Image: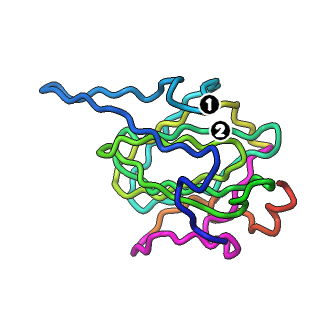
């Protein structure tokens, strides 16, 4: 499969957010309904990752339990990856990536039908998620982060940190049956 530029994917949005800096610190808005295609969110979550070069993903929920996500990095930096699993899409099985950090202040909206993951680029990275559906572990699927069919080109680093769950992810041939 191929890596494509973010604008190739229907429904993906890269949203810039303003940052107001003062002598006390900074302030920015992490969600405005008028700026996203999706604004009926169900849950907010925060992930705190202690090590740089930590890979999380590629995660998604199936069918009616699918989730749209708005991803924001509050501290640190990630390379955020997404795979289009919408069978009727012109970018089906292609992936994209975008850098999200506390300097560029961008947010990424990922619609339903995509697998999602990232690699941290800084220690103590804090990521905020808005999700439009509840977490349903029985319908969660993890595609192995280095699946050869999708062939994501992750950065080459000396040491990776990956959870057992992500190391034990399914290969695409097994995931395809669930789509």
- Relative vertical location of residue 84 with respect to residue 14 in this rendering, above or below: below
Q: Quadrant of the N terminus?
A: bottom right
Q: Position of residue 129 (x, y in %)?
A: 53, 36
Magenta stretch: helix, strand or loop mostly: loop
**3 magenta-colored:** no
Q: Quadrant of the C terminus?
A: bottom right
Residue on which the image places disc 2: 68
Mark 1 residue crowding within 10 angstroms, few (<14) / some (14–19) / many (20+): some
Which mark sits nearer the N-terminus, 2 or 1?
1
* Residue 73 point in image, percent of width and height: 41, 42
The residue carrying mark 1 is 38
In the image, is residue 142 part of the stretch drawn in magenta?
A: yes
- Determine contact: label 2, label 1, CB under 8 Å: yes
Question: Where residue 42 sits: x, y (%)?
Answer: 64, 25
Range of magenta residues: 139-159
Label number found at residue 54: none
Residue 36 location, quadrant: top right
């Amino acid at each position: 499969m191929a890596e494509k530029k973010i604008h190739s994917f229907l429904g993906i949005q890269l949203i810039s957010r303003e940052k107001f800096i003062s002598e006390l610190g900074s302030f920015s808005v992490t969600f405005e309904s008028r700026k996203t295609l999706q604004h009926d969110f169900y849950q907010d979550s925060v992930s705190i990752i202690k090590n740089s070069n930590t890979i999380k993903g590629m995660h998604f929920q199936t069918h009616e339990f699918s989730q749209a996500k708005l991803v924001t990095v509050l501290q640190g930096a990630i390379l955020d990856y997404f795979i289009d699993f919408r069978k009727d899409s012109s970018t089906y099985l292609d992936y994209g990536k975008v850098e999200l950090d506390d300097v560029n202040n961008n947010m990424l909206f990922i619609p339903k039908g995509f697998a999602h993951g990232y690699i941290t680029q800084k220690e103590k990275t804090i990521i905020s998620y808005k999700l439009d559906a509840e977490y349903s572990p029985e319908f969660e699927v993890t595609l192995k982060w280095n699946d050869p069919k999708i062939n994501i080109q992750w950065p080459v680093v000396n040491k990776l940190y990956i959870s057992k769950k992500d190391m034990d992810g399914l290969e695409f041939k097994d995931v395809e049956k669930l789509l």
